[in-house]
Image (spheres, helix red, strand yellow):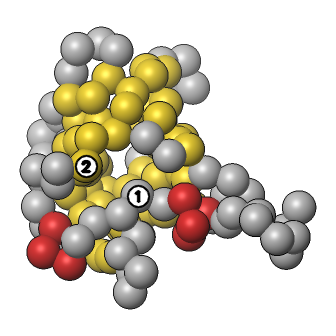
Amino acid sequence: MAGSPGAANAADMALKASPSGIGSCSELVFTCENGRQYPLCPIAVSIDGDVVTASLHTGRSGGVHVRLVPMGVGYRYAGPGVWVDGFGGNALLNFGKHSQIACTIENY
C-alpha cells in the first residue's frame, strides 16, 4: 500500500549507477538464461543515482532507448519493442509479447 511504512516505490527499486557510469556500458549488465549479456548504458541518472533513461544493447544495431516507468513495486524500463521488469537483482527481459528471458543484473 502506498504511503505505508516500508512501502517501496519505483524510484526506491530502480537500478543504481554512479555519476561516472553515465554513458558507460560496462557498469550495468543483464546476464540472461539464454547465455547472452545485455549492457544497459545510462543516459540520465537522478540525484539519488537511479537510472532514469538508458540505452539497452540487445545486439540489434545500436541500442534501444529505454526509460524508467513508474511501478508500484520493482522497476520497469521500456522502449520500442522491448521492456525489462525487475525487482532487485532479478529481471525479466521481454522482446514483444511472446518472448521473455529471465536475467540477473550485474553491477560492476
Give the amino acid at mark 2: Asn
Could you tell me if residue 73 is visible in this image?
A: yes
Q: Are marks 1 and 2 in contact (CB under 8 Å)?
A: yes
Is there any visible trace of residue 63 in the rendered image? Answer: no
Q: Could you say where residue 25 lies in the image, as x and y percent from the top left?
A: 13, 53
- On the image, the x and y values in percent for residue 41 come to 20, 57
SS of the residue under disc 1: loop
Tell us which disc is closer to us: 1 or 2: 2
Give the residue displayed 20% in from the left and 29% down from the top. 37
Query: Which residue sits at x=57%, y=67%?
Result: 12
Please give the name of the residue rendered at 56% of the width and 69% of the height, measured from the top-left corner: 11
Q: Which residue sits furthest front?
A: 5
Outermost residue, top side: 34
Q: If the image is split into quadrants, where does the N terminus sit?
A: bottom right
Label 1 or label 2, whichever comes before in sequence order: 1
Pick the front one: 60 or 53: 53
Q: Does residue 29 sit above or below 92 in this rendering?
A: below
Is 53 left, or right, of 96 in this rendering?
Answer: left
**Residue 97 sits above or below residue 85 on the image:** above
The residue under label 2 is 107
In the picture of the structure, the residue carrying the numbered disc 1 is 15
Q: Residue 86, percent across and down?
A: 53, 42
The amino acid marked with disc number 1 is Leu
